[in-house]
Image (spheres, rainbow, N blue to C red):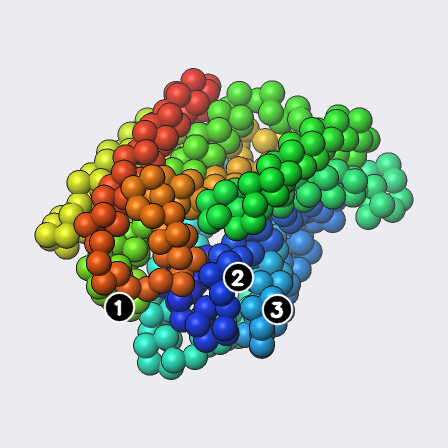
Amino acid sequence: MAGIDARIVIIGLPQVIHAIGADAEQGIWISQAYIMGTIGILLLTGRFSDLYGRKRVYTSGFLIFTVGSVLTSLSISPIQLIIFRIIQGMGAGIILASSIAIITDATPASELGFSLGINNLGFRFGAMAGLTLSGVIITFFGDWRALFYINIPVGIIGTIWAHKTIKETAIQNHPSKNKFLSVDWVGFALFTASISTLLLALTFAAYGIGSQTLTALFVVISIGTFASFLFQEYRSPSPLVNFKLLKIREFTGGLIALLINGLAWGAVLVLLSFYFQLVLGLSPLDAGIRIIPFDIAFLIAGPISGKLSDIHGHLPFTTSGIVLSSLSLYLFSTVNMTTSYLTVLSYMVLFGVAMGLFSSPNMSAVMNACPADQRGVGSAIRSTFLNVGFAVSLNLAVLIMSLTIPYALVTQVAAGYTTTLSTGKEMFLQSLKTTYLWLAFANALAIIPSVLRNRIK
């Protein structure tokens, strides 16, 4: 479900915007709200799963996501839709962070890479389905609300299934009788304020919403609240984040590589959608279908690389994955209006294989480095780094594109408010090429932390 909803709005966003009567600015927040909800809840999820047990938290994530889907489908105004997408994102964040910790608890270290690779199949299959389902629903049903109806039965079944089949893990002992009050709520509030104002500032800067003064103010608030969060965590008897984890070289190196990689490739599928729809003039359904080979390649490569990394260690796979993904991003920068789809297909397959090579072994290395009683927090930190990278990626791509084409045009396109280009396709294509080159360079930087961390067999 989380995978489906992460992608289902990419193709269907223009139709959602026009159907609900949103303006360009609201269209931006419809897209951004989901990721804001996901990131904001992650650290609290990790702490709760260590205190109360993974099963309880995981099941509550399913329930919250399902309720959010119901409310989203019933929205009658853009503001409601934005608020309910935040609730959806919170549920998705709980599911994603908890599932990794559950799998790590249940799997021997020597098999963790393969198990996490299999787990990735669920998300990638959902993401792949999201691309095609959105096109099918918009094309044949013509009702944007149906984009979220599909989550409701799956969410109900998933909640019941998780409650009945997953065994509860050992719950962390805590000297306080009231575990709820022992949570560092001040730290949670500071972290939420910091990450929210950071995303607001990045979005304002990328899309030109609000004044420069307001953007600068959000940056200052974000830095100030993050510094306060760090101070609070160091002095708190029950911190959300155990900073001792960051002293583990394998853990921190994997996180930095993951952050850089997420920042580089988070916008790639959106850029491919721009290419297929705006440059080539394809329908949302056709665009979604043409992107599927990336997910298929990812689906195949993930478990294989995870299994091999269990035997040979993660380093050859994480590093080669970064190298190949950087190469594929460069190859995307060579695509033009006359490039055959077969060529673009080969680049997408290479990119999917590269991401599969990196993802499962890196996740396994990070989670294996976590002490057993800190896996909930460790998984939450990993998910936070990944999602922050993804959130920054699209904003960064918009800013890079604006160096080539008019700023107003790129913000309208990224917001989903402009769905066709009658003129200027060559210039728009050039902006995509420039963006791919910058992303390739950024992604290559992830090689450094990936290589420098210790190797685990």
Q: In this view, does 277 lie to the left or right of 82?
A: left
Q: Which of marks 2 and 1 is in front?
A: 2
The count of marks equals 3
Residue annotated with mark 1:
283
The quarter of the rendered structure image containing the C terminus is top left
Q: Where is residue 182 in the image (x, y as percent from the top left)?
A: 83, 41
Calculate the distance from the C-alpha at mark 1 to the C-alpha at mark 3.
Answer: 28 Å
Say the numbered circle drawn on residue 69. Answer: none
Near-viewer residue (291 or 430): 430
**Amino acid on which disc 1 is placed:** Ser
Would you place residue 285 above or below residue 274 in this image? Answer: below
**Amino acid on which disc 3 is placed:** Gln
Helix, strand or loop under label 1: loop
Q: Where is residue 104 in the image (x, y as percent from the top left)?
A: 54, 41
- Label 3 neighbour load within 10 Å: few <14, some 14-19, many 20+: some
Q: In this view, does 179 lie to the left or right of 390?
A: right
Residue annotated with mark 3:
80
Calculate the distance from the C-alpha at mark 3 to the C-alpha at mark 2.
Answer: 11 Å
Q: Position of residue 264 (x, y in %)?
A: 38, 37
Would you place residue 328 above or below residue 293 in this image? Answer: above
Q: In this view, does 240 lie to the left or right of 387?
A: right
Say the numbered circle drawn on residue 26. Answer: 2
Q: In this view, does 372 lie to the left or right of 412?
A: right
Q: Tag 3 or tag 1, which sits nearer the N-term? A: 3
Q: Which residue is drawn at 33% across and 74% down?
A: 136
Q: Residue at x 36, y 32 (%)?
A: 443
Helix, strand or loop under label 3: helix
**Amino acid on which disc 2 is placed:** Gln
